[in-house]
Image: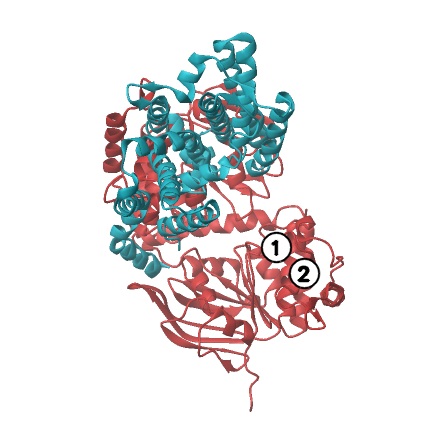
Chain colours: A cyan, B red
Amino acid sequence: MTTASIDSARNRRGLSFIGNWRQYVVYIGFVLIFAVFAVVLSDRGFLSTNNLLNITRQTAIISIMAMAMTFVLCAGEIDLSVGAIAGLASVVSSITLSRYGLIPSVLAGLATGLVVGAVNGGLTAWVGIPSFLVTLGMMGFARGLGMWTSGTSPVPVIDDTFIAIFGSGNIGPVPVLVFWVAILGTVSHITLHKTPFGRKLLATGGGETAARYSGVKTRTVKFQALLITATAASIAGMLYAGRLQSGRFQLGEGDELSVIAAVVLGGTSLFGGAGTVVGSIVGALLIGVINNGLILLGLDFSQQLMARGVLIVLAVALGRSQRS
Amino acid sequence: MTKVAAAVEMTGIKKSFGGLNVLRGVEFSVDRGTVHALMGENGAGKSTLLKILQGVVAPTEGSISVFGRPMSVHSPEISRSLGIGMIFQELSLIPSLTIAQNIFLTREPRRFGVFVDDGAAATRARALMSELGLDLDPNTRVEKLSTGQMQMVEIAKAISQNARVLIMDEPTSALSGFEVEHLFGVLKRLTADGVAIIYVSHRMDEIYRVAEHVTVLRDGRNVATASLKQMQIQDLIEHMIGKRVGVFDWRPRAVDRSRPPVLELRNVSGTEKPIEVSFKVHAGEVLGIAGLLGSGRSELARVMFGIDQKLSGEIRVKDRPIEIDRPRAAMDAGIALIPESRSREGLIVAHSVRANLGLPRIDDLVRGPLIDNAEEAKSTERIVHKLRIKTETDAVPVRTLSGGNQQKVVLGKWMATNPDILILDEPTAGIDVGSKSEIVELIRGLADEGRAIVMISSEIAELLAVSDRVLIMSDGRLVREVTRDEISSWMEDQDPSDSDGGARIAKAEHGLQMLLQEVRLTAPAR
């Protein structure tokens, strides 16, 4: 066993360059794919300001949920209900908006996330049901609740301020969605990497027993992580409502998978203990660029789905850290 | 003139790992139909020798034959086919499968050569178990069994794979008294059938009951092989310890017991262990806790730190009762625990040295809402420097450090919380001699600073080197207190001419080892 550890130490040193290379695969992949599309699609407006802004607008909402999902995955849990929560929150805030005005509508949207998140977190942390199951159940429940509340029909959003703040507005030439990503991204990044809470979160995901022995209240940490994803999803829901000028229970359908794909692409471990917010955002952008490029290439939707699937698995496989 | 070949015949076994000679020529022979005890201290080479027999590790030199058939290739498959079976300490059964499914895992009886025939498996399992005198329904799921029953299933599984040599490592440490009796009954049946059993244990009362022969390993050599009828416990322990050279001597220290104790336990009981434990520790005192595997030492530590539940009794810190229901409560009361399992409980091995060192007091390492990087870096530097932790930078994962340096990181992260009370559970397990002596020195220093220390250890030499008193645990209870005077009396009552350090320490160890065994021999039957 002594020889084995010496050997592996030697290997680690020898492979450290490759190890680093793998860590940054999402950034390398982003640059490579962006460059390929920029050359191949130069005559189809891929590099036009309009198209680039379009990409960021389309990926912003996924990015915001991906930041929060980074937290949950770092804590060693998962949240499959983000898409459904976004749909529910879009319905709740739209209905409240038409009846009580702007501020109550935003509060109601956020409250939706907080309540759902508290249920997810409580069942996971204190009752001990795996988050995979809790949020799988919540995915159906929240979607159904949104459908029931809205009577299956879209709820129109006609408040100009709401539309401007959430999703459709611009500040100068820049879409307001980009600001949402920048602000929430900065806050998330700082929270994960520079606060005691972030450390405890990574510790809980990296080794729950050791974290507990070190005085970390691991259940509270897991509760908070699931509260964060649900709240972020409710913000995403309001952004959907503002962008599409209506609240619909179907909004965000299937987003949980795009979000998890973006986060894992970004280098966050599915097993907890390691992750980056910036990586998740770039992961979301990468998926956005792939989608956009494939559309411009003239692939039809079925081909896009297939190509996207292959590219994501390929990127994750390349970025997978060596496990002995 | 044809002699019946021994069940196991290992000759001239040598093994070195990267220049370190773990085995230096071991002769080990086990007769068929006998129980052969293999003894030795931690690090004597027992586990390496057994790993070689199991084919997991290849010897550097030496030859092995099993029932006369030579083992020329070293692989677990070859070993198994020669009839070697290991009864794992960490049970290797799958809890969600039934007894029968576990026994025949990957060798299931088939119907039409395709379908698994659970009925036939159950019938065969039942026959097998009745041979062993076991009364268990083969369709019971393993998760419903007690530890002792699981062990029986392990044995049945090994026998069904035609094992003729069973290796058992501390098989009774997790068993109840009744289960131990049952196990011994099963071993008797097996040996009557010609099976040879290699039995590793530190419990000499059991060894004298169950085994015919014993081989003692020390420093990678077999120093004694004999029939147990011809060897007294004292001699056995002497063979295990040998003459100590260059180990740690006790240094007398003054402990002020006039003031109230820093930590006091009054009749503290956990869910199973500990049972009604009471003791006091004063500032500047090192209290050693000794006991064999399964005596409840670690459980005691976990109850004191709020990890295991305390059922009854009172824990008092500085003369005030404290409710410790979680680690945070223990930490707030000034308690720190260096836990038994370094990699699972002590460290997050994939995270950096710095992140590990900061974790217990991360809430205090802040400026405003953010972690104070400068302060954290400074504090990390201080600990790394003070404990001489050998690491390239503080950003490398703890996993890449040696065992001794990892243990220093655990010590460092808790020393940084500036605790009044430090509980150490096996702080020197599995680390090199150099780090050991550094850690012993560190513990002395911490006590000299006025902290109260509770040190739990199986390594008697280290325990004796630092403890002002030693308490002995057995079956969850504190059964004996050993004072320094008593320890000195062991050292002195031999003839004083050979009073060089090594021999004196060996005598002290001998005395404590004897006591550990005695408290079991004299304990009332459970």
Which structural element holds mark 2?
Answer: helix
The percent coordinates of residue B310 (x first, y second) are 58, 30
The C terminus of chain A is located in which quarter? bottom left
Which structural element holds mark 1?
Answer: loop
Q: Nearer the viewer, residue B513 or A57?
A: A57
The percent coordinates of residue B268 (x first, y second) are 58, 30
Tell me the subunit letter for badge 2: B
Decide if residue B52 is on the left or right side of residue A29.
right
Residue at x 44%, y 13% (from the top left corner): A160
The percent coordinates of residue A93 (x first, y second) are 53, 17
Establish if A41 lies above or below A66: below
Establish if A185 lies above or below A108: below
Mark 1–mark 2 CB contact (< 8 Å)? yes
Instruction: Tell me, yes or no, whether dots 1 and 2 are on the same chain.
Output: yes
- Residue A37 position by quadrant: top left
- How many numbered markers are drawn? 2
Residue topped by disc 1: B94
Decide if residue A79 is on the left or right side of residue A294.
right
Tell me the subunit letter for badge 1: B
**Amino acid type of the residue that numbered disc 2 sits on in the rendered structure:** Gln
Q: Nearer the viewer, residue B415 or B218?
A: B415
- Which residue in the rendered view is the most extreme toward the front? A43
Q: Nearer the viewer, residue A215 or A236?
A: A236
Residue at x 70%, y 70% (from the top left corner): B110
Whether residue B455 is visible here, answered yes or no, is no
Residue topped by disc 2: B101
User: Which comes sooner in the sequence, label 1 or label 2?
Assistant: 1
- Residue A63 position by quadrant: top left
Q: CA distance from mark 1 to mark 2?
A: 9 Å
**Amino acid type of the residue that numbered disc 1 sits on in the rendered structure:** Ile
The percent coordinates of residue B81 (x first, y second) are 55, 75
